[in-house]
Amino acid sequence: MASTDVTLEELQAGIRNVPDFPEEGIQFKDITPVLADARLLDGCISHLLCGHSADTVDVVAGIDARGFIFGAAMARELGVGFVPIRKKGKLPWKIIEESYELEYGSNTIAIHTDAVSAGQRVLLVDDLLATGGTAAAAANVVVRAGGQVVEVVFFIELSFLAGRAKIGAAPVRSLVRY
Ligand code: AMP
């Protein structure tokens, strides 16, 4: 189960930088080497959860798509439920949606209207914080659905893009920064 002997330096060393993907000028942070390593995956989940328990979090919400990988594992570890925040057109029920700008392109995300109940404490997670548009929109749909965002956590933060300034009131934490 989640261990803390994995250092943040080890996690950073597991991230593969892929230049010019998916388009020229983007330094894509590929987390698949971390996911494929059982010890690093376990350590990453543990660091993402740091300080949280089922006493502080009612539900984990993950952002499409890599936020699902971490979010579901974190929810299981805490013993709470998981809520997906999905890209437009994927959720089958009634939705609340928001549009935002990406580091590359633009997008719309959505949450089911009944995904969180009023006042629920939501821990929001994604793999990477870039310009902050995705996470800001995700936090907004959680709040509009009735939840309160206790923290927004990321494996990776591209600090030079200043994305955390966009996220609003919720505390923001990241494990590895560039
Ligand atoms: P943003 O809305 O600009 O903060 O973009 C964050 C979202 O886009 C996250 O879901 C990331 O998975 C993805 N993303 C943006 N930039 C990168 C990057 N350089 N490497 C990997 N994923 C990225």
Image: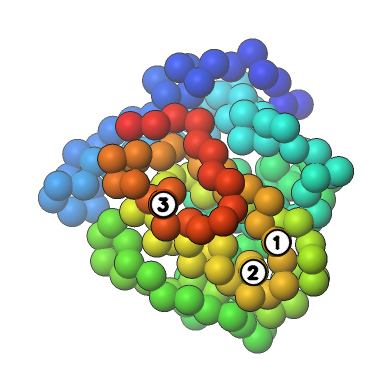
Q: Which mark sits nearer the N-terminus, 2 or 3?
A: 2
Residue 42 picture location, percent across and down: 64, 28
Considering every residue shown, the one lying at the far bottom of the view is: 94
Whole-number angstrom distance, CA of label 1 to CA of label 3: 18 Å
User: Residue 67 at x, y = what percent?
Assistant: 54, 51
Residue type at tag 3: Ala
Of discs 2 and 3, which sits in the foreground? 3
Front residue of 117/32: it is 117
Tag 2 and tag 1, C-beta contact below 8 Å: yes
User: Would you name the residue on which mark 2 appears?
Assistant: 143
Q: Which image quadrant: the C terminus?
A: top left
Q: Is residue 103 visible?
A: yes
The 10 Å Cα crowd at callout 3, few under 14, some 14 to 19, many 20 or more, is few
Q: Which residue is mark 1?
A: 148
Which residue is painted at 62% across and 63% down in the image? 84
Contact (Cβ within 8 Å) of mark 1 with mark 3: no
